[in-house]
Image (cartoon, rainbow, N blue to C red):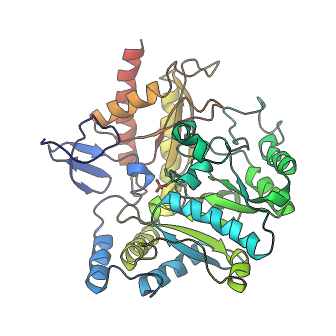
Amino acid sequence: MERSYVIKPLLNEAYPMISHGKGIYLYDTDGKAYIDASSGAVTASIGHGISEVIEAMNEQANQVSFVYRSQFTSKAVEDLAFELNKLIDADEDYHTFFVNSGSEATETAMKIAIQHFQEKGQHQKNKVISRWTSYHGITLGALSLSGHKKRRERFVPLLHDYPVAPPPSCYRCPFNESFPGCQLKCADELNVVIEKMGAEHIAAFIAEPIIGAAGGAIVPPRGYYERIKEICEKHEILLIADEVMTGLGRTGEALGMDHWKVKPDILALGKGLSAGYTPLAATMCSESVLEPIKNGSNFIMSGHTFSANPQSAATALAVLYYLKKHGLVQKSKTNGAYLKRQLKTLFNQFDFIGDVRGLGMMVGIEFVRNRASKDPFPSPTFLTNKLVKKAQENGLLIYPASTARPQGDGDAVIIAPPLISTKEEVDQIVELLKKTLKEIQAELN
Ligand code: PMP
């Protein structure tokens, strides 16, 4: 290829050029096919080249693509917010503030939480607690909330303190205990942290329902979120669910939190919301979170030029209709359970697999040098990088992740194919992964 002027993730690396995508496959300009078992960045959740979505995009583009949110609303935006409220299915209504990326969505969530208390005269309640294994985004506010050591380390002086609450990881329990004997110490620790800091200083607690990039699809133990919700309510602290990765059916429920029937006060959506067809993300909050702002300044102190543009809203609406029409949330649950079962069979064949976990079409595999001690490979992300690269060479795309080790290192990947994947396609994914793991095993030996 000729000289490139694009700054890519690895500056000195050549990247294959994609020609087109169809269903769960991507094709590069050399004619090579890839199974998109990561949905890109856990994003292309209904697959590529879906004609209903493309038609809706065209239709909207023929009407109007952009209007400025301070001047106009549009039918597409109103309809999308209406559908999202239905999706939450709570006793009270949820309202949506549209943004363009998951980072903006979590950062806006933090700002809405702080503003909620300001408008009630509780100006000191302005800190947000998060967990030390977490990823909420790359902009400085969202990164401040994130317990992702590698992504933070260069910018530490610009960030808030490191997140303080422990992750609910049973595989790497921060207290070296096991469930249920632990009695959910990881949840109760939030109470300890709040009491130490003083609830009068804390606006919210933010959590990914299932920890993604930072932890490799960590599912909390039973009862964890119910306990977390109780603790938040006791201290008048808002619960923010970062559903950027887990939302819109990815884990086999409409929202990740639905697995525990816990309603967050605020939530962030992204990725699967527009399934990658256009950039779009959203922050949603309950009527009671919004009320003091409505009755106070009547203005959310945030927003972006592209917020609430009709083009992205029409796209996301078409994605949402497609999810419903094809029962993809349920399909994610059943075929995701099948995916996890098949991946678990690899556990007996490869002794460097430490754990297989996840829900729906979000399954994580953690790798260890020694299964008994759970020690990681000596250099951080050594195995993940090798595996992701080799898999891509073999025509399989998988998503790199970190682990819940307190040091913030370790090797994990997430297998997150589009929710449309059939059982036969899941079999293909598992076969290609097996082939790749065998190659890795040969190298390790
Ligand atoms: N929150 C979570 C849970 C995520 O997984 C991500 C992206 N990996 C983000 C926030 C940030 O989203 P974006 O990359 O769209 O800014």
Q: Quadrant of the C terminus?
A: top left
Residue 78: x and y, percent?
49, 84
Q: Quadrant of the N terminus?
A: top left
Vertical placement of 424 versus 419: above or below? Answer: above
Residue 310: x and y, percent?
39, 79
Residue 136 appears in the rendering: no
Residue 27 appears in the rendering: yes
Vertical placement of 346 versus 320: above or below? Answer: above
- 193 or 53, nearer to the observer: 193
Vertical placement of 418 versus 148: above or below? Answer: below
- Quarter of the image where one finds residue 174: top right
Q: Count the marks: how many?
A: 0
Residue 322: x and y, percent?
40, 70
Spot the residue most to the front.
157
| Residue at image location 50% in from the left, 72% down from the top | 98
Residue 112: x and y, percent?
65, 69
Judged left or right of residue 318, residue 159 is right
Spot the residue most to the left.
2
- Quarter of the image where one finds residue 3: top left
Judged left or right of residue 257, residue 430 is left
- Quarter of the image where one finds residue 278: bottom left
| Residue at image location 72% in from the left, 81% down from the top | 291
Judged left or right of residue 118, residue 251 is left
| Residue at image location 29% in from the left, 86% down from the top | 63
Judged left or right of residue 171, residue 307 is left
